[in-house]
Image (cartoon, helix red, strand yellow):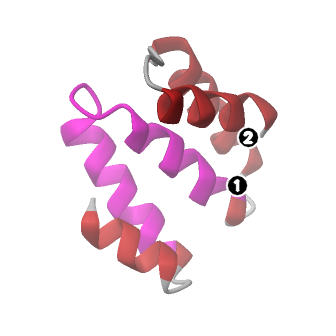
Amino acid sequence: SLLAESYLYNGDLNDAEKWYERCVKNFATKNPELIYWLAHVQKKNGKYSEAKLSFEQFLTGYKAVSPEQKALRQKAEIE
């Protein structure tokens, strides 16, 4: 996920999306926040229908406990 994040923060959204997809496939059960970031990048890449599905997947399975997690969940609900 660090590679995906670095692509995201450097503005390389296509590579960020590719790496977030890989991370989601391999680590989403342990780190469901990866699904949020995939959806975020998909939206930035103009893939709105895919982003909507990813946001819905994130919201369906994400259990927000900490204040940071609750804030991320609220961001996903707005997007």
Q: Residue furthest front?
A: 67
Query: The residue under label 2 is which amino acid type?
Result: Ser
Q: Residue at x 32, y 42 (%)?
A: 24
Which quadrant of the rendered structure holds the N terminus?
bottom left
Q: Which residues fall within the magenta stretch?
A: 14-43
Residues under labels 1 and 2: Cα distance?
Answer: 8 Å
| Circle 1: residue type | Lys
Direction from residue 18 to residue 53 in the image, left or right: right
- Judge whether residue 71 is colored magenta: no
The quarter of the picture where the C terminus appears is top right
Kindly state the secondary structure of the residue where label 2 is placed: helix
* Location of residue 21 in the rendering, given as x and y in whole percent from the top left corner: 37, 51
In the image, taking residue 73 as reference, residue 6 lies left or right, namely left
Tell me the tag on residue 49.
Answer: 2
Residue name at image x 73 percent, y 40 percent: 49
Residue 43, located in which quarter of the rendered image?
bottom right
Is 18 rendered above or below residue 20?
below
Q: Which mark is residue 43?
A: 1
Residue at (50% x, 50% y) in the render: 37
Residue count near mark 2 (Cα–Cα under 10 Å), binned few <14, some 14–19, many ≥20: few
